[in-house]
Image: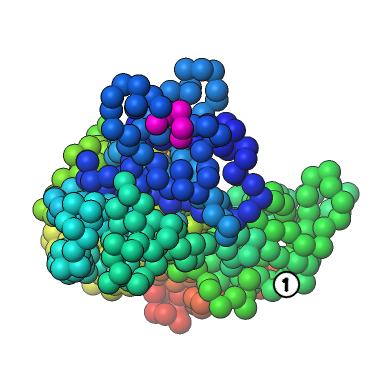
Amino acid sequence: MKRLGATDICEENMTDKEQMNIVIVGHVDHGKSTVIGRLLADTGTLPQGKLEFVKQMCLKNAKPFEYAFLLDALKDEQSQGITIDTARSFFKTKKRDYIIIDAPGHIEFLKNMITGAARAEAALLVIDAKEGIKENSRRHGYLLSMLGIKQVAILVNKMDLVDFSEEVFEALKKEYTTFLNKIDVRDVDFIPISAREGDNLVTLSGNMRWYSGMTVLSKLDNFVHEAPDEQKSFRFPVQDIYKFTREEDDRRIIAGTIAAGSIGIGDNVLFLPSRKNSRIKSIESFNTEKKEMASAGEAVGFTLETQLYIRSGELMVLENSSHLPKIGNRFKANIFWVGRAPMIMDKTYKLKLAATRASVRLVEVKQSLDASELTTVNTKKQVDRHDVAECVFETAKPIAFDTIEDLEATGRFVIVDNYEIAGGGIVIENIQENESILKQHIKDRENIWDKGFIDTIEREKRNKHKSKFVVFVGVENAAKQSIAKQLERELFDKDHNVYYMGLSSIDHGLDADIKSYDLNMEEKVRRLGELARILTDTGLIFITTIDNADDYDIEILKLLSEPNEISVVSVGESGLVKFKPDLEIKEVSNTEEAVKKVINLLMHKEVILEYYL
C-alpha cells in the first residue's frame, strides 16, 4: 500500500523548485506513518482545514488524535472523486520539494526501485527507541544497502517513551552502527525524535538539550541532490547507424537518444568498448532547425569527420572526459527477479543495458533477500522469483557501462529470459579478473578432448601442410570474400586440405531451428570459434570472413581455437584498434595478387612449405 497527497497538494507544492525523492522504511508500529503525517502538518503541506477536520473526527469518535491518521484521511479523499497519486506523499521546505515514497509493499517497491520506476536519492529509517532494533530494522538496512542508497538518516523515534534518555539513544546508535558497517552502509546520521510530539523534526527539542545535531527537516535539506541529466557526463548509447546511397550521399548517421550530458559540433568523441574515436561533424534531427548543440533526452543523429564502422550498442562519450564508463565483461550487480523460472548459473540470458544487447550468465549469488518477507539468505545458488540478490554476472564479451553510483542512465539494466523481461538490476561494481567462464570452458574442453590414434604430425605429413584458421576481416562489401574463396580454390588445386565457410552459414546451418536474427554477434563468433577448433584439429586450413570484426571478436576466436593458432588478414579498413593483423591489404586492385600475399604469409608461418606448392 502506498501513500499519497491530494490533487490540490500536488498543484500547490510541486513547483518548479528542486525536487528530491526520499524513501522511508521501518518496522511496523515504529512510527513511520506518524513521521510522514507530522512532516506534512508541520511544513504546511496539508490541504486547508484537513488537520482540524481529522482532530474533530477523533474527538467525535472519542479517539486520541494521531498524526498517522492524516495519511488515511488523504487516502479517503479518493472516494470523493479527487485524483490522487497513490505512490507518493508530498511536502516542501524553503530549499526544495520532497516526494516521500512509502515502502510497506516490499515486492512492488523493490521492483520499482531497482528498475528505476521509483528513484530514491536518500532514505529515512525509523526505529522505536523503546522496542529497540528489531530483525526488520536490520532487513531494512540491508534493503537500503542493496538498492545502493548512500544517503541515510536513522530516526530513533518515541524518545518520549524512554524519558528522552541520551544513554538509550547512544546504546541503540552504537548497536545499529555496528550492523550497518557490516553491510557497507556508512556515514549515517542518527537523529533522536518524538514524531508524535514533534521533537527534533522541524526545530530542536528542549526535551533533549544533550542533542545538538540537525533536525529531520534540516537533515533532509542537507542531503545532496543529483545534478540534472544534462549536467552529467555525456553518454550516447548508439541505437542504429543509418547509411545513405542515393545521389552520392555517403553519410553515415549514428542515431540514438542522449542519456546524459550535452555535446556540440567539433567535440572529440570516443566509442566504447571498441575505443574508436572521431570528431562530431554535424548534429542531425528530424524536422528541426540546424543544431549546434544537443543534450540529455534528445533523440538525434551524428555524422563524424572520419568514417567509423561501429556496431549498435556502442557507447559514445566525450574523449577528454574525466569520468569515462567502465569496460569489462564481469560486474557485480543487485537484481530483482520476477521471472517464472529461477535464474540459474548454467544458462545464458540476454542483457539489455541502454542500447547494448549482450549474452550474460550468472556467475555467483553473493547474498539474497526474499522481498516478500525480507528474509536474508547467503547460501543460495540461484535467484528465485521476487528475490533481490547481489550477484556477479559475466557477458560474452566486454561492454561499456557505469556503476549506479556514477551514472544511473547507463548503470541500470534488464535481463530477458525466453523473450520476456525477467529481472531488473543496477550495476554496483566492475570486476577485473583473469578468470572467466570462457577460459574455464576452454580448460574443461581441452581436458576431456577425446582424440583418436592419429596425431598432429601424421596429419601434417598426409596433408602436406599444417592446420590453420585463417580469418579475413574488414568492413562490409570489401573484397575479402573474393580473396578468401580464391585462396581456397588455389590451395585446393594444389591438393591441400582446405575449406571456406562464411559467417552467414552459422545463421542457417548450425542450430537451424533458431532464426538467424535471434543470434547476436557474440554467439555467432563463439560458435565459429568452436567449429574452428574442431576443423583445425582434423588438419584443415579453415578459412572464414567476418564483417566489422572488433578486437574482442578476434580475442574470443584466438581463445576458442587454442591450442591451434589463427592468422588474421585485414582487407581495406579493418575496424581493429589494438589488435595488429598478421597481414594488411589496404587496397585490392587484383584478387590474384592479394591471394599470393596470403599464401606468402602461410609460407612464412610454415603452414605450407614451398616445395609442396
Residue 442 falls in image quadrant: bottom left
Kind of residue at badge 1? Asp
Q: Tell me if residue 301 comes above or below residue 9 in the rendering.
A: below
Residue at 20%, 67% in the rendered image: 166
- Residue range of the region highlighted in magenta in the rendering: 51-55
Q: Quadrant of residue 101?
A: top left
* SS label for mark 1: loop
Q: Position of residue 507 (x, y in %)?
A: 45, 42
Image quarter of the N terminus: top left
- Most frequent secondary structure within the magenta stretch: helix
**Image point 54% across, 50% down: which residue?**
92
* Residue 300 visible in the shown view: yes
Count the numbered circles shown.
Answer: 1
Asked whether residue 133 is in view, the answer is no
In this figure, which residue is indicated by the disc labeled 1? Answer: 267
Q: Which residue reaches farthest bottom?
A: 604
